[in-house]
């Protein structure tokens, strides 16, 4: 992984995407994109710590351990800054370091903008944007103190750059914030060799999109907005995660990589 202001020789080999010896943190890894990302990083060689609120995450940990990698679950509400910081500190105690953060934890609600309450606004902002920032900050502090480069991968959304009529205004606001936060952190932390990027998934088959998929008319309309005319799967996000975590992306920072089946191509 590259250092700030220094050219990095990269050998073009089959190991370009290898993550052997790296330690990754994935937030919200009990299901969906988080679970797929955690397992994908392990397949490519990383040890993984999953920070989240669901006890179901233990299943993901067991699956990673079955791959021969070290894995732990640290119960964490990333919307609570103290918990986020203590979670990262425990990872460092357990593994000695951290190299990669996949900032995946997120929540959503659907309500007409004119009916959104301050409580709804605050709860979604606390996890999706505030929590993401302070997780990134905690990991960056470790990397800076250890004088080592690293990767921060924020999971955004197509809704970070487009609007919709489904009543997800707060979610749009958080995801738009993530896009520009990614750019800002990439510029600030480049001098430390910390590469910060964002992935913008389209509609993925997860618990979060279940309500949409259960409405035949809405499901069909949203499928048709994707050039590929379908929802994606969590596993289809893994390639982008591994790419941004590996030496295949040493000259990539501040980017918003869409994995959206062509949703934003129109």
Image (cartoon, helix red, strand yellow):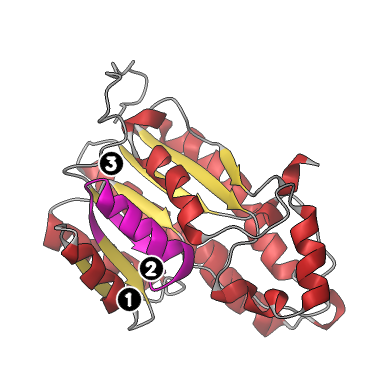
- Which dot marks residue 144? 3
Horizontally, is 135 left or right of 256 in the view? left
Helix, strand or loop for disc 1: helix
Mark positioned earlier in the residue sequence (2 or 3):
2
Helix, strand or loop for disc 3: helix
Do residues under tags 2 and 1 come within 8 Å of each other at their CB atoms? Answer: yes
Disc 3 versus disc 1: nearer the observer:
1
* Rendered location of residue 106, percent (x, y): 53, 68
Horizontally, is 60 left or right of 29 in the view? left
Horizontally, is 167 left or right of 247 in the view? right
Query: What residue appears at the point 68 percent right and 80 percent down from the top-left corner?
Result: 211
Helix, strand or loop for disc 2: loop
The answer to which of 2 and 42 lies nearer the viewer is 42
Q: Which residue is mark 1?
A: 57
Query: What residue appears at the point 17 percent right and 65 percent down from the top-left corner?
Result: 66
Crowd around label 1: few <14 · some 14–19 · many ≥20 (10 Å) = many
* Rendered location of residue 132, percent (x, y): 48, 60
Q: Is residue 178 above or below residue 220?
A: above
Q: Which residue is mark 2?
A: 29
* Rendered location of residue 16, percent (x, y): 30, 29
Q: CA distance from mark 2 to mark 3?
A: 25 Å
Tell me the quadrant of the picture where the N terminus can be found: top left
Query: Image quarter for residue 264?
Result: top right
Query: Image quarter for residue 206?
Result: bottom right
Q: Is residue 254 above or below residue 111?
A: above
Crowd around label 2: few <14 · some 14–19 · many ≥20 (10 Å) = many
Q: Is residue 29 magenta?
A: yes
Crowd around label 3: few <14 · some 14–19 · many ≥20 (10 Å) = some
Horizontally, is 176 left or right of 30 in the view? right
């Amino acid at each position: 992984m590259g250092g700030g202001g220094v050219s990095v020789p990269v050998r073009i080999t089959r190991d370009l995407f290898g993550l052997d010896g790296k330690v990754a943190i994935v937030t919200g890894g009990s299901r969906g994109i988080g679970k797929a990302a955690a397992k994908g990083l392990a397949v490519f060689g990383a040890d993984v710590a999953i920070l989240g609120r669901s006890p179901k995450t233990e299943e993901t940990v067991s699956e990673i351990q079955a791959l021969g990698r070290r894995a732990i679950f640290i119960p964490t509400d990333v919307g609570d800054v103290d918990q986020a910081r203590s979670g990262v500190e425990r990872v460092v105690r357990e593994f000695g370091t951290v190299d990669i953060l996949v900032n995946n934890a997120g929540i959503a609600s659907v309500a007409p903008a004119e009916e959104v309450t301050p409580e709804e606004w605050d709860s979604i902002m606390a996890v999706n944007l505030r929590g993401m920032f302070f997780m990134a900050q905690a990991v960056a502090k470790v990397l800076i103190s250890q004088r080592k480069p690293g990767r921060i991968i924020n999971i955004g959304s197509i809704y970070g750059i487009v609007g919709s009529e489904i009543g997800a205004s707060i979610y749009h606001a958080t995801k738009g914030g993530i896009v520009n936060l990614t750019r800002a952190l990439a510029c600030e932390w480049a001098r430390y060799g910390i590469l910060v990027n964002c992935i913008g998934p389209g509609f993925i088959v997860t618990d979060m999109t279940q309500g949409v998929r259960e409405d035949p008319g809405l499901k069909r309309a949203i499928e048709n907005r994707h050039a590929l005319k379908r929802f994606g799967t969590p596993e289809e996000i893994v390639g982008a995660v591994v790419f941004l975590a590996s030496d295949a992306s040493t000259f990539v920072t501040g980017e918003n990589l869409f994995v959206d089946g062509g949703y934003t191509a129109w």
